[in-house]
Amino acid sequence: MMVDAMDAARIIAYFKGKSILITGSTGFLGKILVEKILRVQPDVKKIYLLVRGGTDARRRVQEE
């Protein structure tokens, strides 16, 4: 089922000025989601990325 223009406008309005927490942001779908939010939702207040800890967490965020 396709989202019509009215639904898309409601979604954009809903996220305006909101903060979003994304888990798994360095995975395949997480990267696509973050890119889509940055491209389509420019009025999002903040995006928080929850990344699994470890010695390579910073590298994963920067490279992915």
Image: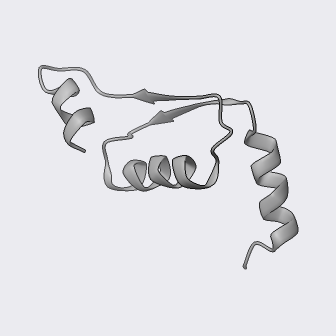
Q: How is the image coloured?
A: one colour
Quadrant, the C terminus: top left
Quadrant assignment, res 6: bottom right
Q: Residue at x 77, y 62 (%)?
A: 8
* Relative height, residue 49 to residue 42 (above, below): above
Left or right, residue 29 beside residue 17: left
Left or right, residue 34 beside residue 42: left
Left or right, residue 54 beside residue 37: left
* Relative height, residue 4 to residue 7 (above, below): below
Quadrant, the N terminus: bottom right
Q: Residue furthest front?
A: 42
Q: Residue at x 31, y 48 (%)?
A: 27
| Front residue of this view, candidates 10 and 24 | 10
Q: Residue at x 73, y 40 (%)?
A: 15
x and y, in percent, of residue 5 in the image: 82, 71
Quadrant assignment, res 21: top right
